[in-house]
Image: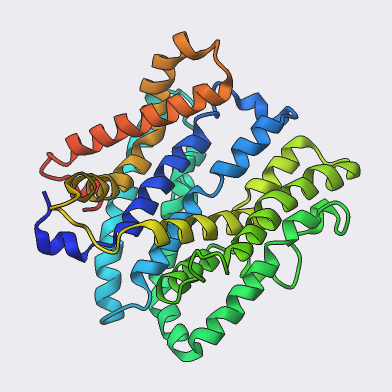
Amino acid sequence: MLSEAKLQRRIPYLDILRVLACLLVILIHTPIRPYDVYYNTPSVTGAVYTVLVAVNCNLFFMITGALLLPVEGSGRRFLKRRLRVVLFPLIVWSVIYLLEHAFVLHNFTPRLLTSILFHPVEGVLWYVYVLLVIYVTLPLVSKCIDAIGKRGVEMVLVLWILSSFIPYQHGIFIEAAHYNDNMFGAFANYYGYVLLGYYMHHYGLPVFTRAHGWKYALLFFFGIVLMPLFEFLVQGHFHITWQQHIDTITTDISVNNIAMAALLFALVQHFSPKRYDRKNHPGAATWWPRLSMATFGIYLSQMIVLRHIVWPLTEPWLTSAHWVVDCLVSGVLAFVVCFLLTLLLRRLPFNKYLLGK
């Protein structure tokens, strides 16, 4: 159990967001094996499910910006502390997944080994690769933020949001093969979410009142409803496959993902308590920090748990259910199993090399 001093240093809404993001990551992966065909099969249900869960890792990047910007202290000390948290677990879990591919899945190739320095051996590890680059550059970005101030950050965010419209232009405006070649390409990266998290944490959006309600309604309608409808109904006339439609609405730098991330961040930020109250709300003060601190281990272990525990366990009794029900049940079950596994791993003397902390 955390001491009272450590508990009060935690930020409740960021703990809740971290748990939510971790669950959404698992939910986007649960359809991979049993329902891989749905990505290529026209389905309104599949499209809605994808739009709702695709925001996942973007919330993690926003949390990084909220917690770590501006960088305090020397850049060298920051890098030493942050890289130690993610680098050792990345190496260990890369070895674990390599062994799984070689001896369990039997799909090991020399390319998996030779590309490990710049490409993850398991898809879910991509986030850790990107996080490493973000950590290395955060001290520099922190100084840039100090130099340009609030208005400068807003200008960068506006350019980044403009770049998020580009994926939706691959039919009516731009040839599908060319839409990556554009003047805003430099802004189309995950740093936008880092800056957005920093901005919302330090400056925030308008509070949820009746006077500002229309702004959030407009953000929801335009970003989460209208743009996906545009993709499916308008772009569908330009010989674009269902897979291309799904890829467009699930790409991390897209209008609907930015809108969803901003809305979820603002909602949780507004309705969460400002601090933990162990006396009046002991459950929340115990479980949200505990779950939050386990999310890195849950994230790293999820595919092993899905492939070797959850999918074999649920397949016999959920195959007759609708695939969304199967995905939701499997996702929640995987989250619970991964959490328990993380608690067990924390008992090992070398757990910091597996879990970071």
Q: How is the image coloured?
A: rainbow
Measuring from the top left, give residue 282's x and y in whole percent. 16, 47
Is 220 left or right of 180, judged from the image as shown?
left
Task: Please name the residue shown 63% across and 50% down the image.
Answer: 251
Residue at 47%, 91% in the rendered image: 147
Q: Position of residue 317 (x, y in %)?
A: 45, 9
Q: How many labels sit on residues?
A: 0
Measuring from the top left, give residue 90's x and y in whole percent: 34, 49
Q: Is residue 334 visible?
A: yes
Please state which of residues 328 and 39 is positioned toward the viewer in this rendering: 328
Question: In the rendered view, does 163 fall on the left or right side of 233?
Answer: left
Instruction: Please say if 69 is above or below 84.
Output: below
Q: Is residue 122 above or below residue 277?
A: above
- Position in image of residue 353 (x %, y %): 22, 49
Q: Is residue 75 left or right of residue 129?
A: left
Q: Residue reaching furthest front?
A: 210
Q: Give the answer, above or below, for where 304 lies relative to 251.
A: above
Q: Quadrant of residue 182?
A: bottom right
- Residue 178 sits in quarter: bottom right
What residue is rendered at 48% in x and 51% in y?
57
